[in-house]
Structure formats: structure tokens, C-alpha cells
Amino acid sequence: MNKPLAFTFIIVTLTIDAMGIGLIIPVMPDLLQDIEGGDLGHAAIWGGILSMVFALMQFLFGPTIGSLSDRYGRRPVLLVSLLVIAVDYVVMGLAHSIWLLVLTRVIGGIAAATQATAAAFISDISTKDNRSANFGILGASFGVGFVLGPLIGGLLGEYGFRVPFFAAAGLASLNLLLGYFVLPETVSKTMRRRFEPARANPLGALVQIRKIPGLARFLLVFFLYEFAFYSYPAIWVYYAKAQFNWEPGMVGLSLASFGISVAVVEGLLIRRILPWLGEKRT
């Protein structure tokens, strides 16, 4: 196995995932107003619904996708996910019905519920000495994607609010092609676990979490952090348009500056802080 190349693919995959989301954020108000009509406030409501549907599907299907990767391997799950995501963005770019957009967010949310699979892949190829640092890079990849995605999406949005969707589909397709050639399988026959519906759902996963001392409290903190974190990109594009009348390019630039901060902390500072403070105090 070429571990550095495999690790690079996972980082690129998560970066492109973040880019795909970031690409379409600056143009969502224009797309929704074009499809639904109405004012910006009406578009913001539908934008919130679409974000909620996408996240809900990730929550519901994350354990299922993770269990499938334990049974059938990381490689097929990740590659199929990229294929579905690419098609999903094309359909979004062509959509002229709000209910078709809702359907694409349902399918896209299921296909994008691969963070646990990607994290498991990193764990498979990491050692005790570099595991924390590798997961730091994993987090930084989201920051990099969140810098490039809105920035590029904002610039492309100046040429048409549907253009970023096709750009996101192209990125996912290129990464699928790369993964087909370089992504190895890390789940050996001895590691494979039988698919059990009791574990492959959020409630079953929560039951399993209770068996690990201290993990439930940590995940509660993580939930509160994520709740606060994702409130920001969900409303910012609508607020910036209403308050400052910003065009997609300026919205993308503002979101990119936020992503730079994430990337600097998780990609650079974490590696300096971990040896000094340790994981718990960090």
C-alpha cells in the first residue's frame, strides 16, 4: 500500500467535499429566488430547510454508511459516494423545482455521510505516533476547502448562479477518477464486521457510545460546538445580501477568510500545541 498517496486522496476528498458545499453557498439565494420567486426572506427559509435536510440525512445515515464500510470496505463506499455526489450536483444545477432541490439534498446528504468512513480510513493507515497529527490535517482539509470553495463559487457565480453547481460536479468526478486508481482497501478479512441493523442507525450508535467511558460527555461538547459552528454559514450568505447587498464574489471572499482561520489553526497550530499541552488539555 502506498500510504502517503492514499492519505493524500482522503485529504483531497474531504477538501473537495468542503469545496463542493462552499461553491454553492454564495449563489443559493439567487437560485432559490429564481426557482421560488418571492423575497430574500422567503429564500432564506428554504435555504434553512435544505441545509437541515442535508444535515439530517448525514445524521441518520452516517452510522449506516460507516457500518457498510466495515462490512464491504472503505474503497467501494467512498467511490460510490463520490459518484452519487457528482450526479447530485448536476441535477441541482438543472433543477427548476424546489421539491427537486429537496430531493437532491436528501440524496446528497446520504452520499456525503462518509466522514466516519474517511476517519476510519485515516485510523487504518495511521500509527499511534502520528494519529493525532493526521486527524489535525483531516480537520485542516475542511478549512482549505472552505477557503477555496466559496472563493471560487463566488467568482463563478458572477457568470451565472448555476455555474458553481457544475463546477462542484466536475471536482467530484475528477476525484472519483483519482480514487479509482490510487485508493487501496484497508479493511482486511480479519477486520470485516457483519452488518448489523442494530448498530447501523443513530440510536444503535448512541447505545454503543455509552459502553465507552467518558465518550458521551465528549460528544455532547462536540455537538454543541458543531451546532454553533454550522449556524454561521447557514445564515451568513442571506444576512450579507440583506444587510450589505453583497454579490456572490464578496460573500465568497468573506467565507474564505473564515476558512483561512480554520486551516491555520488545525493545520499548523494544532501540531505545535499537541506536544506542549497534550490532547486532553488542547
Image (cartoon, rainbow, N blue to C red):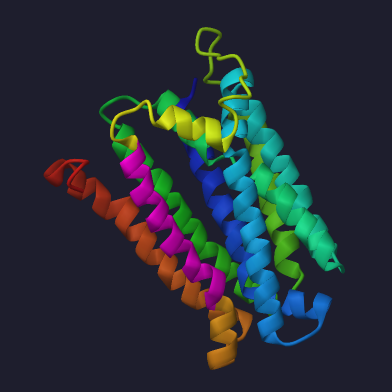
> Is 55 situated left or right of 254 in this image?
right
Can see residue 262? yes
Q: Is residue 49 above or below residue 125?
A: below
Q: Residue at x 76, y 52 (%)?
A: 88
Q: Nearer the viewer, residue 129 or 190?
A: 190
Is 254 within the magenta?
A: no
Is 230 within the magenta?
A: yes
In the image, farthest residue toward the top: 190
Q: Residue at x 81, y 83 (%)?
A: 37
> Is 269 situated left or right of 49 in this image?
left
Q: Position of residue 242 (x, y in %)?
A: 59, 89
Residue 245 lies in what quarter of the image? bottom right
Q: Nearer the viewer, residue 105 or 12?
A: 105
Q: Position of residue 33 (x, y in %)?
A: 76, 80
Residue 252 lies in what quarter of the image? bottom right
Q: Which residues are magenta?
A: 216-236
Q: Residue at x 67, y 44 (%)?
A: 110
> Is 16 situated left or right of 50 in this image?
left
Magenta segment's dominant SS is helix
Q: Is residue 141 above or below residue 70?
A: below
Q: Position of residue 111 (x, y in %)?
A: 68, 43
In the image, farthest residue toward the bottom: 244
Residue 157 lies in what quarter of the image? bottom right
